[in-house]
Amino acid sequence: MNPSLRVSSVLFAAAMLGACAASAPRQAADAAPAVAATPASPAASPAGPAPNDNLNAVAWTQTAVEHDLIYREVYRNATEKLARALKDTAWDALPKDERSGSVRDLAPAVILDIDETVLDNSPYQARLVRDGKNFDEFSWAQWCREKAARALPGALEFTRYAAAHGVKVFYLSNRAQDLNDATLDNLRSAGFPLAADETVFLGLGTINKDCEQVGTEKGCRRRLVAQTHRVLMQFGDQVGDFVDVLANTPDGRRAAVEPYLDWVGERWFVLPNPTYGSWEPALFNNDWTQPERVRRAGKIGKLRY
């Protein structure tokens, strides 16, 4: 996950909430000009928060039993396949350009993203919906420092099982470096296995002197793990948690995973995240400076009818 991409929208919510536009306050000044703006803030309106495209996504994440079942299914599937991966000394889950040399003599490991993969940050997203706000670094950092994110279903059981069977558990995150301590404290308080020296936590800013970092891509940090470990499995809610994406467009994202489709459910385990992600800016040329109405039009333009 990349926190800088957290401003997200789910278009299904727009359809559900469109009927409320006439009576509910406007969320943003740059919304479609056909609807008259009102000065009332979401918090001040007796009708409640302004319509928010992310409402359905956050509500599903927090309340739908299907959400929890998917997480349990993914982690249970991974647990069942871990023994086979351990026995196969050639088994490796890293993209081919991130691995050089044999893996047979390397210690086993798994790599997991943190946010929306092992820790549930939906309360932060819910606050944004309630308050009629978008993601910003300050409020996100405040949430992280609360250390209140809960373990997602199945994540504790899998990571503890892996650690108990001699598999080192690495956590890769794109949280800012000043959130490292809070993140580690949150992982510990939630019960996740962590090495005493904390080398299993590879946050944004972790240096691999043999690799040139590109933006927030995780490839250099995966290569760092590859120097000492055979990676049996990877877990995440974004394509970038598994492989670097050269072009963040719908076609570019598909092309990045195309060579590894047979690994999905075997070596790569993907979790659902409809609330935010790099999939969203891929729909409007990755340009967050555009007015909201323009970004929204870009997303609507990508729908199939």
Image: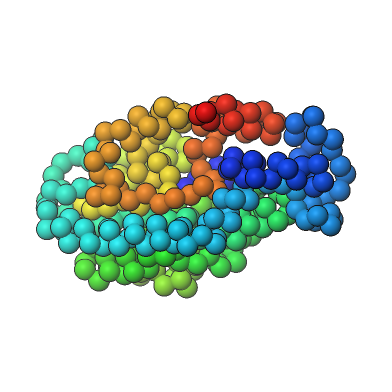
Report if residue 300 is visible in the image: yes
- Determine the image quadrant of residue 297: top right
Drawn side of residue 215 relative to residue 222, left or right: right
Image coordinates for residue 241, horizontal then vertical, percent:
39, 45
From the viewer's side, name the closer residue of 124 and 49: 49
- Determine the image quadrant of residue 202: bottom left
- Residue at 24% from the left image edge and 41% from the top image edge: 262
Image coordinates for residue 301, horizontal then vertical, percent:
57, 26
- Residue at 69% from the left image edge and 34% from the top image edge: 292
Report if residue 155 is visible in the image: no
Image coordinates for residue 185, horizontal then vertical, percent:
49, 68
Image coordinates for residue 187, horizontal then vertical, percent:
45, 66
Drawn side of residue 198 relative to residue 6, left or right: left
- Residue at 44% from the left image edge and 50% from the top image edge: 272
- Residue at 30% from the left image edge and 62% from the top image edge: 76
Give the number of marks. Answer: 0
From the viewer's side, name the closer residue of 272 and 278: 272
From the viewer's side, name the closer residue of 5 and 108: 5
From the viewer's side, name the closer residue of 305 and 8: 305
Drawn side of residue 202 relative to residue 51, left or right: left
Q: How is the image coloured?
A: rainbow
Give the residue furthest to the right. 39
